[in-house]
Image (cartoon, rainbow, N blue to C red):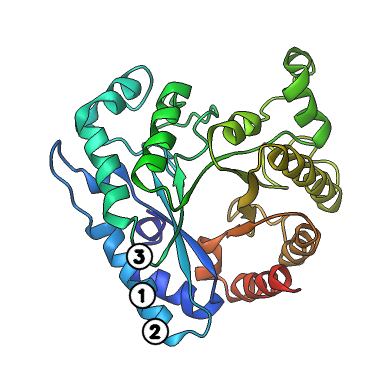
Amino acid sequence: MLSEWLHTDPVTDLRTLLSTTNPDLVRLPVYWDRTQPSPGSLDFSSIDDLLNVVVEHNKESARPTRVILTIGARNFMYPELYAPSWAGPRQQPELGSAQADQAYRQYFDSIVIRYRTSPLLFAWQVENEPFDYVVNATTGADQISAGQMAWEIGQVHHLDPDHRAVTTSFDGWNVFIDWLQLHATPVVWALHAYPSGHPGDALNAADALGLDIYVDGPTTPLRFTSIALRTSWKAQAIQFWADQARAQNKQVWLMEMQAQPWSASDSSFSTADLLTTAAAYRREPLNVVLLWGAETWLTDPAWMNAAVSALAILRAP
């Protein structure tokens, strides 16, 4: 999807990213609309082509790369909901009906069965920000129901007990809001502190909570504060959720760490900010950290170099 926007080739782009950054882990989407273009018909070529790039990279790299595969109706990158046209309107309640249908379950089960034995597979991401209200011009209200999420996580565990299932959410603007969301939700609404995501629900649903953390963008609360201060707030939130996860014998993964400006026209988040946030999060109890910003790296050498430096910081002992 990203490569289509850039009018480039996804295989070439992935090859460039792997050879330049040498990541330990990448996240790849298995889009429902691409994989099941019609009911009963499955096409795995879009993900197989990308996995083959990782295989070829690993033949030459001293640091092998593994993958997290993201499955479900909601997947990362705009427009976030990737229901095929034959499944009906991209909104609830039609989405729930489509996910309960045999065709969707064929897509879901077939993906898990096909890739569960791959030596590249590190984990499954089941849906993307499934409980969060992220409406755009393409989809309506498209949150995934708790019942559907329970089925999907349970099905991954049933079909592939050897790999973790993670799901994602963003959190509040500081740890106090996160605490209130767990213990006094009405107060959060009274303070007009939303959007604060659903990290508690995501943690309860899966084996790991995948946090999506951005410290600068047009919807960032209290944006008049410094990026450094907002980064420190997020570091406190990571520690808070790590404690919550540990109590459930689970983990916290940073699935989207901001590693680019929010948009091409917004330069307030700099390469220096990326390195500062990497250093701050390096000290937190995170089992996985994925950087978000490949579209900027591919078009700007300064950002590609900053991403390489940030990865080195995060890997440092």
Q: Work out whether 6 lies above or below 88.
A: below
- The residue that mark 1 highlights is 55
Q: Work out whether 52 lies above or below 139.
A: below
Q: Secondary structure at mark 2?
A: helix
Q: Nearer the viewer, residue 245 or 190?
A: 245
Q: Amino acid at mark 1?
A: Val
Q: Which mark is residue 59?
A: 2
Residue drawn at (33%, 44%), measured in percent from left and top?
159
Residue drawn at (44%, 36%), measured in percent from left and top?
153
- 20 sits to left or right of 242: left
Q: Work out whether 315 lies above or below 248.
A: below
Q: Secondary structure at mark 3?
A: helix
Q: Nearer the viewer, residue 265 or 218?
A: 218
Q: Residues at badges 2 and 1 in contact (C-beta under 8 Å)?
A: yes
Q: Position of residue 223 (x, y in %)?
A: 78, 40
Q: Amino acid at mark 3?
A: Pro
- The residue that mark 3 highlights is 10
